[in-house]
Amino acid sequence: MAICKLNDMKSALLAGQRLFGLDVGKKTIGLAISDGNLAVASPLKILWRNKFTADADSMFTLGDAENVGGLIIGWPLNMDGSQGPRCDATRDFAHALLRLRDIPIAFMDERLSTQAVESAMLAADMTRAKRHERRDALAAAWILQSALDRLEGTADDD
């Protein structure tokens, strides 16, 4: 499998397979998971980055246990919609994953994901420590939910 368009993700999965959402950062990878109906995203965990192969093995082991058949990776466009060095790093990360496992991968615009979850956590009166502890997994859930909404045609196309 290769990097595919988001609209092709459903046809690349087997019945009941779930999706992982990834918010890839320099120090962490936020992980979220969909339900089997590809309708709801839930934050799962944060992987602290170490060595790529060990990180990927941890992610794939968890994915195998959860019946994950594809990945939605946050696409870090600049606010003006242009691609910068972070997009290059994310693309390289995705291609490195594909060298380890033949799995469908799609990208989802992640602009404002961290700000959206930060605002929600502030509104929920979470402490700074709790926000730091959960931010990346919640951002991954936001990214994944945005992708699931698009797959179902319920996302606003502004």
Image (spheres, grey):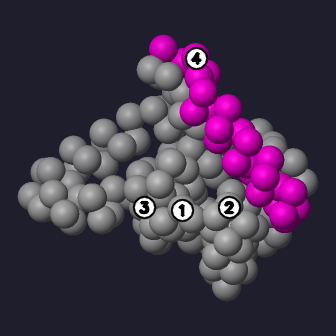
Q: Residue at x 57, y 65 (%)?
A: 50
For label 1, the SS is loop
Disc 3 from disc 1: Cα separation: 14 Å
Residue type marked 2: Phe
Residue highlighted by disc 1 = 49
Q: Earlier in the sequence, mark 3 or mark 1?
A: 1
Residue type marked 3: Ala
Q: Does the residue at mark 3 contact the one at mark 1 (Cβ under 8 Å)?
A: no
Residue highlighted by disc 3 = 137
Q: Residue at x 62, y 48 (%)?
A: 73
Disc 1 from disc 4: Cα separation: 26 Å
Residue type marked 1: Arg
For label 2, the SS is helix
Q: Does the residue at mark 2 contact the one at mark 1 (Cβ under 8 Å)?
A: no
Residue highlighted by disc 4 = 82
Q: Nearer the viewer, residue 52 or 90?
A: 52
Residue highlighted by disc 2 = 52
Query: Does residue 152 sit above or below 57 in this rendering?
Result: above
**Which of labels 3 and 1 is toward the front?**
1
Disc 2 from disc 1: Cα separation: 7 Å
Q: Residue at x 13, y 51 (%)?
A: 123
Q: Earlier in the sequence, mark 4 or mark 3?
A: 4
Disc 3 from disc 2: Cα separation: 19 Å
Q: Residue furthest front?
A: 51
